[in-house]
Image (cartoon, rainbow, N blue to C red):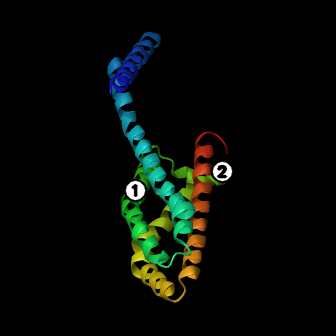
């Protein structure tokens, strides 16, 4: 706790010194009040980006855990589908929070920074990919799974448990591959990679 408090204090001190330096360098162009107002205005973007990244980490990290650990771990067991379903249901519960929050925070950043023009440029393909992956997961979580997939997989698992688990694994691999490609593209694209 002491280390965290010291780091926060150091960050605040550095921010204060930086503000003083800017005021001293260009006093005629910016007032201290303008600098403070400007720095507070940027806090909403910092919060939105932090929330966005946190939600994506929990969401896509969960998809990776289900794909790489859970499905292979239960496939071949006599009650594989019911075990998978009971564990995955817990992940789906948190995904029903993180996926909408990722979408809302992403939309907010695009709106706040007026980035709509990026959707018209091919070099920002990763923006389209983020929206597409979000739409796929949103459709699966809120429409397809509760209305169609849940009963269909349950019925199929009663006839062919191993085949159903292999199908679920393939489905998760496709989602994970698309998600990781999108995350890699977004990170690289945000840092000048494209």
Return the residue found at the far top.
Answer: 24
Q: Residue at x 55, y 73 (%)?
A: 75
Horizontal side of 128 relative to 92 (left or right) equals: right
Residue 123: give its label. Answer: 2
Q: Nearer the viewer, residue 165 or 27?
A: 165
* Above-or-below relation of 56 to 163: above
Circle 2: element type: helix
On the image, the x and y values in percent for residue 133 come to 53, 62
Return the residue found at the far front.
Answer: 78
Q: Residue at x 43, y 42 (%)?
A: 50
Q: Residue at x 36, y 59 (%)?
A: 97
* Above-or-below relation of 37 to 61: above
The 10 Å Cα crowd at callout 2, few under 14, some 14 to 19, many 20 or more, is few
On the image, the x and y values in percent for residue 173 come to 60, 66
Q: Earlier in the sequence, mark 1 or mark 2?
A: 1
Residue 98: give its label. Answer: 1
Horizontal side of 176 relative to 92 (left or right) equals: right
* Above-or-below relation of 5 to 139: above
Measured in 3D between alpha carbons, the distance from the residue under mark 1 to the one under mark 2, in whole angstroms, is 27 Å
* Quarter of the image where one finds residue 45: top left
């Amino acid at each position: 706790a002491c280390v965290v408090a010291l780091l926060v204090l150091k960050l605040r001190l550095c921010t204060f010194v930086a503000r003083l330096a800017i005021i001293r360098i260009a006093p005629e162009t910016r007032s201290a009040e303008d600098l403070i107002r400007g720095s507070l205005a940027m806090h909403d973007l910092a919060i939105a980006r932090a929330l966005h990244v946190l939600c994506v980490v929990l969401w896509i990290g969960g998809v990776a855990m289900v794909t790489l650990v859970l499905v292979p771990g239960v496939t071949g067991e006599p009650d594989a589908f019911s075990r998978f379903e009971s564990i995955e249901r817990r992940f789906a519960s948190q995904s029903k929070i993180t996926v909408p929050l990722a979408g809302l925070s992403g939309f907010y950043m695009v709106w706040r920074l007026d980035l709509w023009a990026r959707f018209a440029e091919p070099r920002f393909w990763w923006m389209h990919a983020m929206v597409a992956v979000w739409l796929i997961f949103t459709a699966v979580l809120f429409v397809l799974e509760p209305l169609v997939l849940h009963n269909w997989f349950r019925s199929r698992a009663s006839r062919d448990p191993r085949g159903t688990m292999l199908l679920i694994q393939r489905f998760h691999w496709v989602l994970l591959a698309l998600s990781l490609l999108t995350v890699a593209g977004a990170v690289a694209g945000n840092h000048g990679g494209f």
